[in-house]
Image (cartoon, coloured by chain):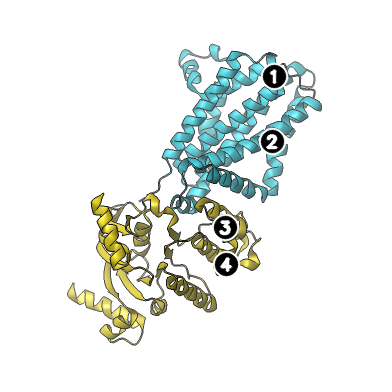
Amino acid sequence: MWARAVDGYIHHMMNIAVQVRDLRVVRGAREVLHGISLDVGAGTVSGLLGPSGGGKSTLIRSIVGVQIVAGGTVSVLGEPAGSPPLRSRVGYVTQAPSVYPDLSVRENLRYFAAVLGAPARDADRAMAEVDLTDHANALVGRLSGGQLSRASLAVALLGAPELLVLDEPTVGLDPVLRKDLWELFHDLARRGVTVVVSSHVMDEALRCDRLVLLRDGSVLADDTPIGLLQRTDAPDMDAAFLALCADSEVLA
Amino acid sequence: MSIRITLATARRVLAQLSHDHRTVAMLILVPSLLLTLLWWMYKDTPRVFDGVGGLLVCLFPFLVMFLVTSITTLRERTSGTLERLLTMPLGKLDLLLGYALAFGLVALVQAGVAVTIAVTLLDLDLAGSVTTLLVIAVSDALLGVALGLFVSAFARTEFQAVQFMPLVVLPQFLLGGFLMPRYQMPGFLEALSDVLPLSYAIQAARSVTMTPDLTGDIVRDILVVLAVAGVALALGAATLRRRTA
């Protein structure tokens, strides 16, 4: 009890929204995360980057608290990940859009708003934030791929989440929409929301305040985008990532 | 437990259904069409139709709600919406009761239309009251919902979910005393039929078609059906996991 209170206090003082310590996850016979540790600062946009299969989704699921973990701890906003007090404080978007295809955009948002205890008008705000107001009454199953993932994202914006955890939210979106969404993420961060975004597109990394590069279940780098570029002396993020991979192989 | 979330869930399930006009039409019309077929088959023996017709009104909601629920909850599990809901402040029972409420209402409409058509147009002669028959039909539907929710946990695909119909429903139907009086069955099968909930549903429906009074036996049979539905719902709640591998 006391340990938890002190832990929460330390989180608050250091402004750490997510703290991962020695996290190990085993899926089937394979260890997917090999004891990783990292901190996510509150009110920042943090990017989780790396190739597919590197453990990004598993780490995200652990932060949200839907992943069975084999060892280590994950605390979110001073509470153990997935604990009941966090259920209205954390917004989560899975890689595959998780909305009801046989409901309209508005009906989907109204339902999730009701579950979260948010007012019904919140549905309209979230819809506007992802630019879907024109499609409010369209069945989600008839939306295009980009519209569908925005509908799923809108659900995570309902209520007043303090932490948003988004698994590849910009996949399949055109450059204009991607830019808009990154502006939205930074806007949310300015309002104090912590945003964790995963992506396998390296050029999105430059838009993050901080980057965690994951490869084969280990943290390859945890730095600012500029720091990474300087450290590797690379012209762009792709090159920086390749340089870091080469380094880690030399060390291994 | 939250009434707000339960009601919102029931409303959401009904909204999903209402977008699917063909399903709504089939849910409401198919039982009545089958009743008409029976009426035609037994045109020269109306006494037989009275018995079989009343039973069908009660059994149809069970069958349909079992199928509909197992498929919808399987979709909920595989599409990621269940995982998303379970990261929110939603109790497992809120979700399950929301489903039960929505499909219970659909069953009420389905059985209501069927029994109205049977009594007015098809001259079904019911010894007991229509209300009792409807209560039995809705209880059977809730049993179907609860069993459907439970078995959906053991299916990974919709093909598998559909296979639970012959596995879970058909034996209960065969052993329930519909084809053969239960006391004439071999001892083991009779004992087996004693523990299958649909036996009590069939018994209650048959009593309503034959006796004018609401007997204690009918009430007991209905309570058995509802109790089993409650247990299946609780078991269904246990299959919803907030954390998965």
* Residue receiving disc 4: A147
Residue A126 percent location from the top left of the image: 55, 64
**CB of mark 2 within 8 Å of CB of mark 1?**
no
Looking at the colours in the rendered structure, which chain would you say is drawn in cyan?
B
Query: Could you say whether the residue bearing mark 1 is in a helix, strand or loop?
Result: helix
For label 3, the crowd category at 10 Å Cα-Cα, with few meaning under 14, some 14 to 19 and many 20 or more, is many
- Neighbours of disc 4 within 10 Å: few (<14), some (14-19), many (20+): some
Q: Which chain gets the yellow colouring? A: A
Same-subunit check for callouts 2 and 1: yes
Asked whether A152 or A79 is in front, the reply is: A79
In the rendered structure, the residue with mark 1 lies on which chain? B
> Which residue is disc 2 drawn over?
B109
User: Mark 2, mark 3: which one is toward the viewer?
Assistant: 3
- In 3D space, how far apart are the residues under numbered discs 3 and 1 (Cα atoms)? 47 Å
Q: Are the residues tagged 3 and 1 within 8 Å (C-beta)?
A: no
Give the image quarter of residue B225: top right
Look at mark 3 in the image and give the residue it sits on: A109
In three-dimensional space, the C-alpha distance between marks 3 and 4, rounded to whole angstroms, equals 14 Å
Q: Disc 3 vs disc 4: which is toward the camera? A: 3
Residue A116 vs B65, above or below: the answer is below
Question: What separation in Å lies between label 4 and label 1 (alpha carbons)?
Answer: 54 Å
Q: Are marks 2 and 3 on the same chain?
A: no
Amino acid at circle 1: Gly
Disc with the residue nearer the chain's start (3 vs 4): 3
Q: Chain of mark 4?
A: A
